């Protein structure tokens, strides 16, 4: 039977190919044509030559000039993948890694995951034959844990370096060392003793001030030099060049048509409403062309999607031709590509994007840009040790990048939803993330890589000493570091191996001791995605009732777990009663709609769940369930998140025990109305107030018992 199945699918494939043969060739030709017309195409030879001549190269070019999609192909054709070596391209964002890999696989005429592939946290689409590999910057950092010389790579391209994510910044420092270590390995004998002494006298010259202990014993093995390419959209080549000891920079000319910039007369109070009005103003008054709207996150994008769909219904029939397409990082990858598909003829496409569309992905067909001038950013207060997500104004550089998106193919218009006087007040460029985020995650990884002296690490831009010290303290409290700030064993090592925030990694390790790892895996997966519940404005009551059916008196964590388990049971039942996987998935989609559950987020959570389950099993942790003993699970939550414990105040607000900060319960929590005395929470969101989300009720007496390292010392 196996044989017959094979032939029938082969037959099917053949039919499809024959059926679309003309389409297939027409498309192939069109792709080749598009590639040839990109600005970068005319400098292919020169670029390959520059990479050959320079071990480190900075490439700066307008967004859309073809850097990300073309350069790896040029290098592949230029012979940089000999002997099975790989060209790695890092992206700050998952979506970019995925969509670009798909595009390049298509341009090369290969199946995704073969010669061209991508790898992002929780999703690996590569194989042994992959030669061009797109990935997130964070993922390459993790790979370095297993392969400190990054020996599979002949070339590493750090793309979108101007974004200056914390991972990019750490990666740059790491790559600098790997490059040095690899060139030393090929030019001289590398032995442990000699390098040990070098490590001790490390501070004698700036260039060599850091050495990775893991990198040292190369045991006489020789590695070919590592080619390093830093790519960036904006013109700050000098900073990168200086950091890499005066590396050569080349500029690629882009094409940019004029863009009219329009401002509002007054500041807007509700930016979603303002954006909505602008969408329809363009739709009704301007000529053809797609619209790109910059929003701050999945939640805003999804409400905007619903608002546009509702408002369209109020227009006369002949004005209905609007198609909305969302794009944000946690969008399932099958849906991400829809943004590139042209709208049906006569339709206007309205792309609702996070700042991913600023430089990371170039979407063809855009003529109008709507820019509310906001971006969501992680923000860390080293004094309180709290990280929060806040919405802040973009920088001037970002505003310019955004408006530039309207002028890729012809003259365009950009509607900035703020007064012109505000523009002048914006910061010139964005503060690198490393200066404003919690460093626990990267410090843990650097420690695992053998970098002990974090303060002495050669960062392109040093984080404040206070932020480093606070994060070290935090890791110590979680048990990841010993009291002389070395990685602890096994806990610290295990934590570093899990692709999760240290606090979540620790919660899984603890859960295996509390016999509730099954529950914690679900919890961590559900906490890793945005907004599981949604509440459409016109169906507030129905949505609230639906949510009540999942609500747990113990808190939001158990509420989320109820959603996960009920949906899993539903799916299981469908499959048991004979539904095919696809059909069962489709009925799950309907189940989600009926229950006002965000099916995208739930799917994402299910994917993450199965991935981290694989990780913890591999690590040998025991996945057991505490059954109905929710007390056990809540105690485990308290033991894991003790740093985020808070006590109720007479006025109904809460005081965080760690730093006495006053916070309030977010309206989405089950505790918005009935407030328990003592809680732990997982997230702090700052809007007009400091709100906490994802909360569970605990007993305050548990704290000194379960986290004596913290609470015993405090009292
Ligand atoms: P850069 O990295 O210089 O910003 P890219 O290599 O990302 O440029 O993009 C080059 C061109 O390829 C752009 O004009 C863009 O429109 C097109 N492109 C990239 N990805 C896709 C895709 N998935 N579908 C259609 N066109 C794409
Ligand atoms: Mg690019």
Image: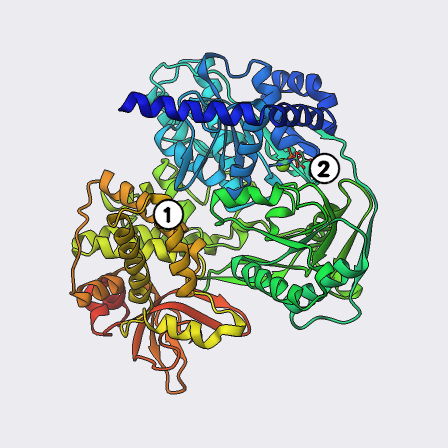
Q: Which residue lies furthest to the bottom in this view?
A: 650
Distance from mark 2 CB to nearest ligand 1 atom below 8 Å:
yes
Secondary structure, mark 1, is helix
Question: Which residue is labeled 1 in the image?
Answer: 583
State which tag comes first along the sequence, 2 or 1: 2
Q: Position of residue 67 (x, y in %)?
A: 65, 31
Looking at the rendering, in which quadrant would you find the C terminus? bottom left
Whether residue 495 is visible to the viewer of this picture, yes or no, is: no
Q: Residue at x 33, y 26 (%)?
A: 5
The residue lying toward the viewer, choosing from 399 and 302, is 302
Q: Residue 665 falls in which quadrant of the image?
A: bottom left
The residue lying toward the viewer, choosing from 91 and 293, is 293
Q: Position of residue 203 (x, y in %)?
A: 47, 34
The nearer-to-camera label among 2 and 1 is: 1
The residue lying toward the viewer, choosing from 365 and 231, is 365
User: Residue 416's mark?
Assistant: none
On the rendering, which quadrant does ligand 2 occupy? top right
Compared across the picture, whether 241 is left or right of 137 comes to right
The residue lying toward the viewer, choosing from 481 and 86, is 86
Q: Residue 61 falls in which quadrant of the image?
A: top right
């Amino acid at each position: 039977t196996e044989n017959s199945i094979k032939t029938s699918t082969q037959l099917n494939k053949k039919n499809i190919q024959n059926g679309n043969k003309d389409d297939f060739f027409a498309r192939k030709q069109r792709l080749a044509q598009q590639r040839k017309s990109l600005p970068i195409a005319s400098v292919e030879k020169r670029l390959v030559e520059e990479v050959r001549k320079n071990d480190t190269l900075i490439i700066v070019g307008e967004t859309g000039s073809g850097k990300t999609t073309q350069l790896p192909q040029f290098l592949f054709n230029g012979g940089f993948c000999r002997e099975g070596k790989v060209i790695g391209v890092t992206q700050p964002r998952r979506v970019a890694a995925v969509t670009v890999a798909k595009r390049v696989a298509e341009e090369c005429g290969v199946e995704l995951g073969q010669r061209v592939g991508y790898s992002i946290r929780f999703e690996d689409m590569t194989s042994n034959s992959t030669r061009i590999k797109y990935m997130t910057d964070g993922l390459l950092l993790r790979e370095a844990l297993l392969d400190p010389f990054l020996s599979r790579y002949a070339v590493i391209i750090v793309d979108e370096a101007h974004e200056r994510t914390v991972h990019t910044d750490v990666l740059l420092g790491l790559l600098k060392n790997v490059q040095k270590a690899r060139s030393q390995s090929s030019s001289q004998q590398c032995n442990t003793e000699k390098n040990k002494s070098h490590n001790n006298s490390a501070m004698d010259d700036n260039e060599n001030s850091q050495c990775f202990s893991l990198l040292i014993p190369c045991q006489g093995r020789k590695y070919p030099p590592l080619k390093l390419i830093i790519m960036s959209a904006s013109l700050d080549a000098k900073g990168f060049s200086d950091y890499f000891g005066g590396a050569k920079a080349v500029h690629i000319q882009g094409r940019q048509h004029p863009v009219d910039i329009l401002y509002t007369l007054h500041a807007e109070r509700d930016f979603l409403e303002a954006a909505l009005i602008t969408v329809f103003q363009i739709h009704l008054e301007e000529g053809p062309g797609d619209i790109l709207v910059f929003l701050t996150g999945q939640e805003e994008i999804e409400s905007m999607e619903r608002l546009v769909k509702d408002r369209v219904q109020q227009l006369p029939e002949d004005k209905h031709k609007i198609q909305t397409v969302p794009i944000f990082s946690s969008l399932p990858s099958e849906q991400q590509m829809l943004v590139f598909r042209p709208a049906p003829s006569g339709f206007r496409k309205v792309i609702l994007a996070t700042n991913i569309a600023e430089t990371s992905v170039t979407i063809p067909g855009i003529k109008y840009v709507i820019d509310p001038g906001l971006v969501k950013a992680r923000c860390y207060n080293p004094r309180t040790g709290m990280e929060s997500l806040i919405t802040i104004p973009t920088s001037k550089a970002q505003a310019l990048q955004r408006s530039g998106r309207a002028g890729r193919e012809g003259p365009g218009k950009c509607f900035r939803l703020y007064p012109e006087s505000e523009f002048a007040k914006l910061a010139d460029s964005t503060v690198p993330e490393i200066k404003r985020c919690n460093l626990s995650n990267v410090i843990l990884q650097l420690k695992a890589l053998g970098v002990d002296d974090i303060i002495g690490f050669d960062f392109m831009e040093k984080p404040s000493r206070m932020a480093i010290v606070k994060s070290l303290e935090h890791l110590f409290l979680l048990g990841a570091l010993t009291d002389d700030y070395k990685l602890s064993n096994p806990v610290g090592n295990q934590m570093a191996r899990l692709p999760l925030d240290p606090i979540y990694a620790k919660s899984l390790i603890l859960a295996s001791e509390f016999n509730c790892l099954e529950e914690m895996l679900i919890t961590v997966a559900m906490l890793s995605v945005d907004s599981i519940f949604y509440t459409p404005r016109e169906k507030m009551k129905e949505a609230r009732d639906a949510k009540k059916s999942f609500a747990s008196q113990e808190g939001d964590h158990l509420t989320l777990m109820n959603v996960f388990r009920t949906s899993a049971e539903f799916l299981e039942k469908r499959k048991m009663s004979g539904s095919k996987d696809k059909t069962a998935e489709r009925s799950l989609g309907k189940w989600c709609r009926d229950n006002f559950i965000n099916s995208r987020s739930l799917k994402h959570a299910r994917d993450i769940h199965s991935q981290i389950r694989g990780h913890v099993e591999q690590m040998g942790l025991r996945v057991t369930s505490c059954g109905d003993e929710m007390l056990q699970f809540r105690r485990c939550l308290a033991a894991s998140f003790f740093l985020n414990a808070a006590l109720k105040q007479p006025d109904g607000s809460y005081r965080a025990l760690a730093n006495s900060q006053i916070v309030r319960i977010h309206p989405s929590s089950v505790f918005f109305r009935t407030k328990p005395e003592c809680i732990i929470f997982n997230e702090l969101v700052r809007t007009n107030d400091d709100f906490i989300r994802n909360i569970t009720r605990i007993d305050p007496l548990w704290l000194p018992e379960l986290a004596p390292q913290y609470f015993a010392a405090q009292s």
